[in-house]
């Protein structure tokens, strides 16, 4: 039987589990401190915890369920990790350096079923969801990498927008957030976490009601149903009208700003016409939304899509600004490595199949 990652337990769940197995409540505090402050990689390192407690934990849980398979380091400080799971599946995690701190982009699923036609993540269909522990462990492995550099750096921000659709793995994603924001552990502030979704409108209501205080990003990429359905299959189930209704609910309940992600694809969605349509779509929300214009990272398997030229990008940006829409052009990271999400994983799997 494959042991579950202990990182999948919130502090409350760990406390309850230990008490159910005959241990004092304070043991949970000891174990939690070893996991997230002292960063133990084996139960045997928890020398202040009694032997019986260590034994029962080791019999039921693992601390390390991910191993580093490939690591790519960019000249700009971006590091892309390809981790191998216990079942042999591969996932990507990315460390990015910003002026405001160190951000980690985590994966929530092995593969993706959303099927965005421009995305490397969807080249391979979803195999399974990641457990909450497997998502947390991505952060821990990156933090251990930083610890070894001995520069005193800590992960400060998290973006949940790696391989997979976070809202399609909703409960495990929520569990992950509760673990990493716990003040007794990593203590990453909720306002420094952003969850991105392709637009599962039904789950947006649940996300709103969960009152997590984290940031929300919507992968929109087109301002009308015809174009969005062409490049994002999810729009058939949740067309823009349903998505906008869910966003209105979110804005009314949370009073928090939303980021709209928009990848610019040459001669497809990058004309001033689409910029005007986007401004119209966001007209009643433009004080509460922020548009992130994203340069496209070409993927070999999606050769029909190309990066918009600089003139088109600036014209799109200028159109939005003139309409009073807050927007920026995203700074690129890791352009000298496999920058597109899912690209490294796809390449490695192809190499394995060719052998």
Image (cartoon, rainbow, N blue to C red):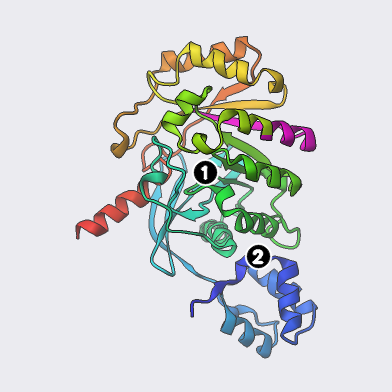
Q: Neighbour class for label 2 at 10 Å: few (<14), some, many (≥20)?
A: some
Instruction: Please name whichever residue, 153 or 241, is drawn nearer the observer in this view of the structure.
Output: 241
- Identify whether 352 is placed above or below 300: below
Q: Is residue 297 left or right of residue 99?
A: left
In percent of width and height, residue 215 lies at 67, 40
Q: Say if residue 41 shows up in the picture.
A: no
Please give the label number shown on residue 346. none
Q: Is residue 152 left or right of residue 267?
A: right
* Count of numbered circles on the image: 2
Gap in Å between the C-alphas at discs 2 and 1? 21 Å
- Read off the residue under disc 1: 96
Residue 213 figure quarter: top right
Name the residue located 47 percent from the left edge and 33 percent from the top edge: 332
| Residue, far bottom | 52
Please give the label number shown on residue 36. 2
- Identify whether 117 is placed above or below 189: above
In percent of width and height, residue 42 lies at 56, 76
In percent of width and height, residue 36 lies at 65, 65
Extent of the magenta region: 246-263
Name the residue located 38 percent from the left edge and 42 percent from the top edge: 120
Mark 2 lies on a secondary structure that is helix
Q: Neighbour class for label 1 at 10 Å: few (<14), some, many (≥20)?
A: many
Question: Is 156 contained in the magenta span?
Answer: no
Instruction: Please name whichever residue, 229 or 295, is drawn nearer the observer in this view of the structure.
Output: 229
Instruction: Please name whichever residue, 32 or 153, is drawn nearer the observer in this view of the structure.
Output: 32
Instruction: Please name whichever residue, 193 or 126, is drawn nearer the observer in this view of the structure.
Output: 126
Residue 17 figure quarter: bottom right
């Amino acid at each position: 039987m494959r042991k579950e990652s202990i990182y999948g337990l919130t502090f409350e769940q760990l406390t309850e589990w230990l008490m159910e197995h005959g241990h004092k409540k304070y043991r949970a505090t000891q174990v939690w401190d070893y996991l997230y402050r002292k960063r133990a990689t084996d139960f045997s390192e928890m020398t202040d915890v009694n032997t019986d407690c260590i034994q029962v934990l080791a019999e039921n849980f693992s601390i390390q369920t991910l191993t580093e398979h490939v690591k790519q380091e960019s000249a700009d400080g971006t590091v892309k990790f390809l981790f191998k799971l216990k079942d042999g599946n591969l996932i990507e995690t990315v460390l990015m350096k910003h002026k405001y701190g160190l951000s980690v982009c985590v994966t929530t699923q092995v593969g993706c079923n959303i099927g965005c036609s421009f995305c490397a993540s969807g080249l391979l269909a979803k195999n399974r969801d990641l457990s909450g522990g497997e998502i947390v462990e991505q952060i821990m492995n990156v933090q251990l990498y930083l610890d070894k550099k001995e520069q005193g750096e800590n992960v400060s921000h998290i973006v949940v927008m790696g391989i997979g659709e976070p809202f399609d793995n909703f409960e495990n994603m929520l569990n992950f957030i509760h673990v990493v924001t716990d003040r007794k552990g990593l203590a990453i502030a909720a306002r420094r976490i952003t969850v991105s979704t392709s637009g599962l409108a039904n789950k947006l209501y649940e996300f709103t009601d969960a009152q997590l205080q984290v940031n929300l990003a919507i992968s929109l990429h087109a301002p009308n149903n015809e174009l969005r359905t062409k490049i994002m299959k999810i729009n058939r189930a949740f067309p823009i009208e349903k998505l906008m209704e869910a966003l209105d609910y979110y804005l009314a309940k949370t009073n928090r700003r939303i980021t709209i992600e928009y990848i610019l694809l040459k001669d497809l969605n990058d004309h001033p016409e689409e910029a005007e349509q986007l401004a119209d779509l966001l007209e009643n929300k433009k004080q509460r939304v922020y548009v992130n214009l994203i340069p496209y990272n070409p993927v070999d398997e999606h050769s029909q899509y190309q990066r918009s030229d600089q003139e088109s990008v600036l014209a799109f940006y200028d159109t939005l600004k003139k309409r009073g829409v807050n927007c920026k052009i995203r700074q690129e990271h890791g352009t000298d490595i496999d920058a597109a999400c899912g690209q490294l994983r796809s390449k490695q799997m192809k190499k394995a199949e060719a052998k």
